Amino acid sequence: MKRPILIHPDPRLKKVCPPVEEITDDLRMLADDMLETMYDAPGVGLAAPQVGVLSRIIVLDCVKGEGETPRPMVMINPEVVAASEEMNTYEEGCLSIPDQYADVTRPAEVQVCWTDADGAAHREGFGGLWATCVQHEIDHLNGKLFIDYLGAMRRQMITRKMVKLKREKARA
Ligand code: K1U
Ligand code: ZN
C-alpha cells in the first residue's frame, strides 16, 4: 500500500528516530509499503519518518538504468561505520521537499552496517549515487534534511516555498 509522504516543514521530519528493537510482520509490511511509495514517487530512497513513522528504517534502490535489474534494499538500524576521505558533490533532491535541488558534498564511499527484514546482519561498501543516497536517508533518521547543509538564506527560501506549496495543497 502506498503511503502519503510528509512535506517539509513538519516536526516529524526533525526528530531523531529510536532504533528498531524487534522485527515484526508490521515492520515488514511498513518496509514493503515504503518500497512501493518510493518506486511510485519516483525516488531512489525513502526513510520511515517521511511516511510519519519514527523508526530507524530506510529503503533504497539506486539502479536507474533502463533494462537493469532492480535492487530493492531494506535497511533496519543502518549505520555508517567508515567513510572515505575523498568527497563527492551531488545535486540532491528530496521527496519531502519536491522540485528543489542543491549540491551537497559528502564522503564519496561509505561502509554501512544494517539488519535486513529477515533479521540478518550486513556490512557493505557503497560508492556513487548509492553512497550519497544511503547518507541522505540515514540523515533523515537523525532529523536532518539536505537543506540543513545549505546557507540559512537558501534554506529559508526553500522552506518558504514549501509552506506555500502545503497551503495550496490544503486548499485544493
Ligand atoms: O529521501 C528522499 O527524499 C528520496 C530522494 C533520495 C536522494 C536523491 C538524490 C540524492 C540523494 C538522495 C530521492 O529519491 S529524490 C528523487 C530522485 O532523485 C530520483 C528520482 C527518480 C530517478 C532518479 C532519481
Ligand atoms: Zn529526503
Image: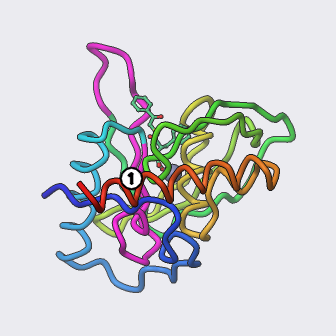
The residue to which callout 1 is attached is 59
User: In the rendered structure, does residue 66 fall within the stretch colored magenta?
Assistant: yes
Q: Quadrant of the N terminus?
A: bottom left
- What residue lies at 53% left-to-right and 54% top-to-bottom? 137
Q: Is residue 160 left or right of residue 171?
A: right
Residue 171 is left or right of residue 133, and the answer is: left
Residue furthest out toward the right: 85
Q: Position of residue 23 (x, y in %)?
A: 30, 77
In the picture, measured across the screen, residue 63 lies left or right of residue 82, that is left
Amino acid type at mark 1? Val
Q: Residue at x 80, y 41 (%)?
A: 84
Which of 121 and 63 lies nearest the eye of the viewer?
63
At 23% from the left and 40% from the top, the residue drawn is 40
Local secondary structure at mark 1: strand
Span highlighted in magenta in the image? 45-70
10 in the magenta segment: no
